[in-house]
Protein backbone atom coordinates (compact mmCIF):
# COMPACT_ATOMS: atom_id res chain seq x y z
CA UNK A 1 0.00 0.00 0.00
CA UNK A 2 1.28 3.48 -0.84
CA UNK A 3 1.84 5.64 2.25
CA UNK A 4 -0.36 8.71 2.48
CA UNK A 5 1.31 11.54 0.60
CA UNK A 6 -0.08 14.74 -0.85
CA UNK A 7 1.72 15.95 -3.98
CA UNK A 8 1.88 19.73 -3.77
CA UNK A 9 0.93 21.75 -6.90
CA UNK A 10 0.30 18.48 -8.72
CA UNK A 11 -2.27 19.72 -11.23
CA UNK A 12 -0.37 22.92 -11.95
CA UNK A 13 2.90 21.05 -12.51
CA UNK A 14 1.39 18.33 -14.70
CA UNK A 15 -0.55 20.83 -16.81
CA UNK A 16 2.55 22.98 -17.33
CA UNK A 17 4.60 19.97 -18.40
CA UNK A 18 2.43 19.89 -21.58
CA UNK A 19 2.64 16.11 -21.81
CA UNK A 20 2.48 14.43 -25.23
CA UNK A 21 1.05 10.92 -25.43
CA UNK A 22 4.24 9.61 -27.08
CA UNK A 23 6.74 11.75 -25.18
CA UNK A 24 9.71 10.78 -23.02
CA UNK A 25 9.61 12.23 -19.51
CA UNK A 26 11.71 12.22 -16.36
CA UNK A 27 10.41 12.48 -12.82
CA UNK A 28 13.63 13.44 -11.06
CA UNK A 29 12.06 13.03 -7.62
CA UNK A 30 9.60 10.13 -7.88
CA UNK A 31 8.84 9.87 -4.16
CA UNK A 32 5.54 8.02 -3.84
CA UNK A 33 4.60 8.53 -7.52
CA UNK A 34 2.12 11.37 -7.10
CA UNK A 35 3.37 13.17 -10.20
CA UNK A 36 4.62 10.03 -11.97
CA UNK A 37 1.18 8.43 -12.02
CA UNK A 38 -0.32 11.46 -13.74
CA UNK A 39 2.53 11.60 -16.28
CA UNK A 40 2.16 7.91 -17.09
CA UNK A 41 -1.59 8.24 -17.58
CA UNK A 42 -1.01 10.99 -20.15
CA UNK A 43 1.78 9.33 -22.17
CA UNK A 44 0.52 5.80 -22.94
CA UNK A 45 2.70 5.62 -26.06
CA UNK A 46 5.71 7.25 -24.44
CA UNK A 47 8.07 6.41 -21.59
CA UNK A 48 8.76 7.64 -18.08
CA UNK A 49 12.11 7.50 -16.29
CA UNK A 50 12.09 8.15 -12.57
CA UNK A 51 14.83 8.78 -10.01
CA UNK A 52 14.83 8.49 -6.24
CA UNK A 53 17.52 7.83 -3.63
CA UNK A 54 15.02 6.35 -1.19
CA UNK A 55 14.71 2.56 -1.62
CA UNK A 56 11.28 2.51 0.05
CA UNK A 57 10.01 5.17 -2.35
CA UNK A 58 11.38 3.23 -5.33
CA UNK A 59 9.61 0.03 -4.28
CA UNK A 60 6.32 1.75 -3.47
CA UNK A 61 6.24 3.89 -6.60
CA UNK A 62 7.11 0.93 -8.82
CA UNK A 63 4.13 -1.02 -7.51
CA UNK A 64 1.83 1.99 -7.93
CA UNK A 65 2.95 2.64 -11.52
CA UNK A 66 2.54 -1.02 -12.53
CA UNK A 67 -1.20 -0.52 -12.06
CA UNK A 68 -1.13 2.05 -14.88
CA UNK A 69 1.34 0.60 -17.37
CA UNK A 70 4.76 -0.90 -17.94
CA UNK A 71 6.27 1.93 -19.98
CA UNK A 72 8.47 3.22 -17.15
CA UNK A 73 11.72 2.59 -15.33
CA UNK A 74 12.56 3.76 -11.79
CA UNK A 75 16.24 4.21 -10.94
CA UNK A 76 17.48 4.13 -7.34
CA UNK A 77 19.91 7.03 -7.66
CA UNK A 78 20.29 10.74 -6.94
CA UNK A 79 18.91 12.94 -9.72
CA UNK A 80 22.31 14.61 -10.00
CA UNK A 81 23.37 11.52 -11.99
CA UNK A 82 20.37 11.76 -14.33
CA UNK A 83 22.25 12.75 -17.48
CA UNK A 84 24.96 10.13 -17.02
CA UNK A 85 22.47 7.33 -16.30
CA UNK A 86 20.19 8.21 -19.22
CA UNK A 87 23.16 8.66 -21.57
CA UNK A 88 24.21 5.10 -20.68
CA UNK A 89 20.72 3.95 -21.66
CA UNK A 90 20.95 5.74 -25.00
CA UNK A 91 18.57 8.54 -23.98
CA UNK A 92 20.08 11.95 -24.69
CA UNK A 93 16.94 14.04 -25.24
CA UNK A 94 13.60 14.13 -23.41
CA UNK A 95 10.32 16.02 -23.70
CA UNK A 96 10.00 17.07 -20.09
CA UNK A 97 11.46 16.86 -16.59
CA UNK A 98 9.81 17.50 -13.24
CA UNK A 99 11.54 18.18 -9.92
CA UNK A 100 9.52 18.15 -6.70
CA UNK A 101 12.14 19.18 -4.15
CA UNK A 102 9.94 18.69 -1.10
CA UNK A 103 10.29 15.75 1.24
CA UNK A 104 7.38 13.35 1.22
CA UNK A 105 5.04 13.09 4.18
CA UNK A 106 6.00 9.45 4.94
CA UNK A 107 9.67 10.42 5.15
CA UNK A 108 8.97 13.33 7.47
CA UNK A 109 6.52 11.42 9.65
CA UNK A 110 8.60 8.24 9.97
CA UNK A 111 10.49 8.73 13.23
CA UNK A 112 13.29 6.34 12.29
CA UNK A 113 14.36 8.64 9.43
CA UNK A 114 15.15 11.50 11.82
CA UNK A 115 13.79 14.33 9.65
CA UNK A 116 11.26 15.70 12.12
CA UNK A 117 11.98 17.78 15.21
CA UNK A 118 8.53 16.84 16.52
CA UNK A 119 9.16 13.09 16.86
CA UNK A 120 11.95 11.23 18.62
CA UNK A 121 14.26 9.18 16.47
CA UNK A 122 17.90 8.68 15.46
CA UNK A 123 19.85 11.63 14.07
CA UNK A 124 19.85 10.26 10.55
CA UNK A 125 18.24 12.53 7.88
CA UNK A 126 19.65 10.55 4.93
CA UNK A 127 17.62 10.32 1.76
CA UNK A 128 19.98 7.59 0.58
CA UNK A 129 20.40 5.03 3.35
CA UNK A 130 23.60 3.82 1.66
CA UNK A 131 25.33 7.11 2.46
CA UNK A 132 27.74 7.27 5.40
CA UNK A 133 27.03 10.92 6.28
CA UNK A 134 24.26 11.43 8.84
CA UNK A 135 23.13 14.30 11.04
CA UNK A 136 24.81 12.49 13.94
CA UNK A 137 28.15 12.22 12.13
CA UNK A 138 28.00 15.95 11.32
CA UNK A 139 27.35 16.89 14.95
CA UNK A 140 30.12 14.57 16.11
CA UNK A 141 32.79 15.64 13.62
CA UNK A 142 32.15 19.26 12.55
CA UNK A 143 33.82 22.15 14.33
CA UNK A 144 31.86 24.95 16.00
CA UNK A 145 32.75 27.22 13.09
CA UNK A 146 31.56 24.68 10.50
CA UNK A 147 28.27 24.13 12.31
CA UNK A 148 27.77 27.88 12.61
CA UNK A 149 28.29 28.25 8.87
CA UNK A 150 25.77 25.59 7.84
CA UNK A 151 23.17 26.79 10.36
CA UNK A 152 23.52 30.35 9.07
CA UNK A 153 23.75 29.53 5.34
CA UNK A 154 21.26 26.66 5.10
CA UNK A 155 18.98 27.50 8.01
CA UNK A 156 19.25 31.29 7.86
CA UNK A 157 19.27 31.19 11.66
CA UNK A 158 20.43 34.39 13.40
CA UNK A 159 21.44 32.51 16.56
CA UNK A 160 23.62 30.03 14.66
CA UNK A 161 26.79 30.69 16.65
CA UNK A 162 25.06 30.34 20.03
CA UNK A 163 23.36 27.11 18.96
CA UNK A 164 26.56 25.65 17.46
CA UNK A 165 28.50 26.44 20.63
CA UNK A 166 25.91 24.65 22.80
CA UNK A 167 25.83 21.64 20.47
CA UNK A 168 29.63 21.27 20.62
CA UNK A 169 29.45 21.49 24.40
CA UNK A 170 26.73 18.82 24.62
CA UNK A 171 27.51 16.67 21.56
CA UNK A 172 28.38 13.55 23.59
CA UNK A 173 24.84 13.66 24.99
CA UNK A 174 23.10 14.22 21.65
CA UNK A 175 22.02 10.94 20.04
CA UNK A 176 18.38 11.49 19.08
CA UNK A 177 16.28 14.17 17.43
CA UNK A 178 14.55 15.26 20.62
CA UNK A 179 17.86 15.41 22.50
CA UNK A 180 19.05 17.82 19.81
CA UNK A 181 15.84 19.82 20.14
CA UNK A 182 16.41 20.19 23.89
CA UNK A 183 19.93 21.49 23.32
CA UNK A 184 18.67 24.02 20.75
CA UNK A 185 15.94 25.17 23.13
CA UNK A 186 18.47 25.47 25.95
CA UNK A 187 20.75 27.60 23.76
CA UNK A 188 18.00 29.94 22.56
CA UNK A 189 15.48 29.90 25.38
CA UNK A 190 12.86 28.81 22.81
CA UNK A 191 9.73 26.88 23.63
CA UNK A 192 6.79 25.43 21.75
CA UNK A 193 4.67 28.53 22.36
CA UNK A 194 6.81 30.30 19.75
CA UNK A 195 5.44 30.12 16.24
CA UNK A 196 8.83 29.90 14.53
CA UNK A 197 10.89 27.18 16.14
CA UNK A 198 14.67 27.60 15.79
CA UNK A 199 14.67 23.77 15.69
CA UNK A 200 12.97 23.91 12.29
CA UNK A 201 15.81 25.93 10.78
CA UNK A 202 18.56 23.83 12.36
CA UNK A 203 16.96 20.59 11.19
CA UNK A 204 16.59 22.05 7.69
CA UNK A 205 20.26 23.03 7.67
CA UNK A 206 21.41 19.60 8.82
CA UNK A 207 19.20 17.85 6.26
CA UNK A 208 20.56 20.01 3.44
CA UNK A 209 24.14 19.30 4.54
CA UNK A 210 23.55 15.55 4.92
CA UNK A 211 22.09 15.25 1.43
CA UNK A 212 24.13 18.00 -0.35
CA UNK A 213 20.80 19.29 -1.60
CA UNK A 214 21.82 22.70 -2.90
CA UNK A 215 25.01 21.49 -4.59
CA UNK A 216 23.22 18.76 -6.54
CA UNK A 217 20.45 21.17 -7.56
CA UNK A 218 22.97 23.65 -8.97
CA UNK A 219 24.66 20.87 -10.93
CA UNK A 220 21.59 19.10 -12.29
CA UNK A 221 19.60 22.04 -13.66
CA UNK A 222 22.05 22.91 -16.48
CA UNK A 223 22.22 19.20 -17.36
CA UNK A 224 18.42 19.04 -17.43
CA UNK A 225 18.16 22.10 -19.69
CA UNK A 226 20.65 20.59 -22.13
CA UNK A 227 18.68 17.31 -22.21
CA UNK A 228 15.47 18.96 -23.38
CA UNK A 229 14.15 18.65 -26.90
CA UNK A 230 12.86 21.81 -28.59
CA UNK A 231 9.59 22.83 -26.86
CA UNK A 232 10.45 20.48 -23.98
CA UNK A 233 9.70 21.76 -20.49
CA UNK A 234 11.08 21.65 -16.97
CA UNK A 235 8.88 22.15 -13.91
CA UNK A 236 10.53 22.73 -10.53
CA UNK A 237 8.65 22.84 -7.24
CA UNK A 238 10.65 24.35 -4.37
CA UNK A 239 9.84 24.61 -0.68
CA UNK A 240 12.31 27.12 0.74
CA UNK A 241 13.99 30.30 -0.41
CA UNK A 242 17.47 28.78 -0.84
CA UNK A 243 16.21 26.30 -3.43
CA UNK A 244 14.07 28.88 -5.18
CA UNK A 245 16.97 31.34 -5.47
CA UNK A 246 19.10 28.70 -7.20
CA UNK A 247 16.32 27.76 -9.63
CA UNK A 248 15.53 31.40 -10.39
CA UNK A 249 19.22 32.26 -10.93
CA UNK A 250 19.90 29.35 -13.30
CA UNK A 251 16.68 29.83 -15.28
CA UNK A 252 17.50 33.55 -15.63
CA UNK A 253 21.02 32.78 -16.86
CA UNK A 254 19.86 30.36 -19.57
CA UNK A 255 16.93 32.53 -20.69
CA UNK A 256 18.96 35.66 -21.44
CA UNK A 257 21.49 36.62 -24.11
CA UNK A 258 25.05 36.22 -22.87
CA UNK A 259 26.47 39.50 -21.50
CA UNK A 260 29.50 39.12 -23.79
CA UNK A 261 27.45 39.75 -26.91
CA UNK A 262 24.58 41.92 -25.70
CA UNK A 263 24.06 44.84 -28.07
CA UNK A 264 25.54 43.15 -31.13
CA UNK A 265 23.38 43.48 -34.26
CA UNK A 266 23.73 39.73 -34.92
CA UNK A 267 23.88 37.31 -31.97
CA UNK A 268 25.84 34.10 -32.69
CA UNK A 269 23.75 30.96 -32.08
CA UNK A 270 26.01 29.71 -29.30
CA UNK A 271 25.24 32.88 -27.28
CA UNK A 272 21.48 32.90 -27.76
CA UNK A 273 19.17 31.87 -24.89
CA UNK A 274 18.47 28.15 -24.61
CA UNK A 275 15.17 28.53 -22.80
CA UNK A 276 12.26 30.88 -22.22
CA UNK A 277 10.46 31.43 -18.94
CA UNK A 278 6.91 30.08 -19.11
CA UNK A 279 6.05 31.96 -15.92
CA UNK A 280 8.03 35.04 -14.92
CA UNK A 281 6.62 34.82 -11.41
CA UNK A 282 6.33 31.51 -9.53
CA UNK A 283 3.00 29.66 -9.48
CA UNK A 284 1.71 29.35 -5.92
CA UNK A 285 -0.76 26.89 -4.35
CA UNK A 286 -4.43 27.78 -4.61
CA UNK A 287 -6.44 28.83 -1.57
CA UNK A 288 -8.10 25.41 -1.66
CA UNK A 289 -4.76 23.59 -1.57
CA UNK A 290 -3.48 25.81 1.23
CA UNK A 291 -6.49 24.81 3.32
CA UNK A 292 -6.14 21.11 2.49
CA UNK A 293 -2.41 20.81 3.11
CA UNK A 294 -0.45 23.10 5.44
CA UNK A 295 2.83 21.78 4.02
CA UNK A 296 2.06 23.51 0.73
CA UNK A 297 2.38 27.02 2.19
CA UNK A 298 5.98 27.64 1.10
CA UNK A 299 5.74 25.87 -2.28
CA UNK A 300 6.61 27.62 -5.55
CA UNK A 301 6.50 26.28 -9.09
CA UNK A 302 8.77 27.61 -11.85
CA UNK A 303 8.49 26.44 -15.47
CA UNK A 304 10.75 26.88 -18.50
CA UNK A 305 10.59 25.74 -22.13
CA UNK A 306 13.49 24.88 -24.39
CA UNK A 307 13.67 27.18 -27.41
Image (cartoon, grey):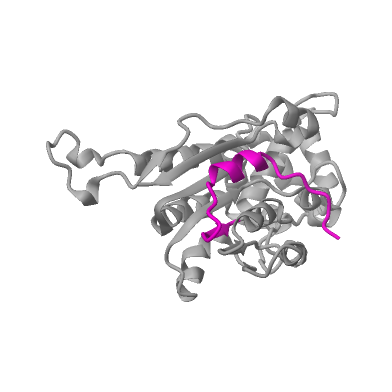
Towards the viewer: 272 or 11: 11
Magenta-tinted stretch: 1-28
Classify residue 30 by image quadrant: bottom right
Classify the position of the N terminus by image quarter: bottom right
The overriding secondary structure of the stretch rendered in magenta is loop
Provide residue 217's location: percent of width, then percent of height. 52, 51
For the point 52% across and 38% down, the residue is 302
Position of 261 relative to 128 (above/below): above
With 265 as the anchor, is 180 left or right in this view?
right
Provide residue 283's location: percent of width, then percent of height. 57, 32
With 263 as the anchor, is 211 left or right in this view?
right
The outermost residue toward the left is 265
Position of 190 relative to 42 (above/below): above
Q: How many marks?
A: 0
- Is residue 77 visible to the viewer in this orientation of the structure? yes
Magenta residue check for 174 = no
Towards the viewer: 247 or 214: 247
Provide residue 189's location: percent of width, then percent of height. 79, 27
For the point 42% across and 59% down, the residue is 227
For the point 66% across and 31% down, the residue is 285
With 106 as the anchor, is 19 left or right in this view?
left
Towards the viewer: 93 or 138: 93
- Is residue 142 visible to the viewer in this orientation of the structure? no
Magenta residue check for 25 = yes
Amino acid sequence: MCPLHYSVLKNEAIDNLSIKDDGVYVDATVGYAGHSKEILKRCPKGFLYGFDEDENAVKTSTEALKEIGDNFKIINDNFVNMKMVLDDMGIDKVDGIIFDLGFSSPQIDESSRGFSFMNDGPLDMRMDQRSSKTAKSIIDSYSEEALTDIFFQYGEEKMSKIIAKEIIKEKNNINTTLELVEVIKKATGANYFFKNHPERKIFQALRIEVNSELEVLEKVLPDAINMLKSKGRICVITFHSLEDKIVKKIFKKYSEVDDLVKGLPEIPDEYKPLIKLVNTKPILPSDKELLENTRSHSAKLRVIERI
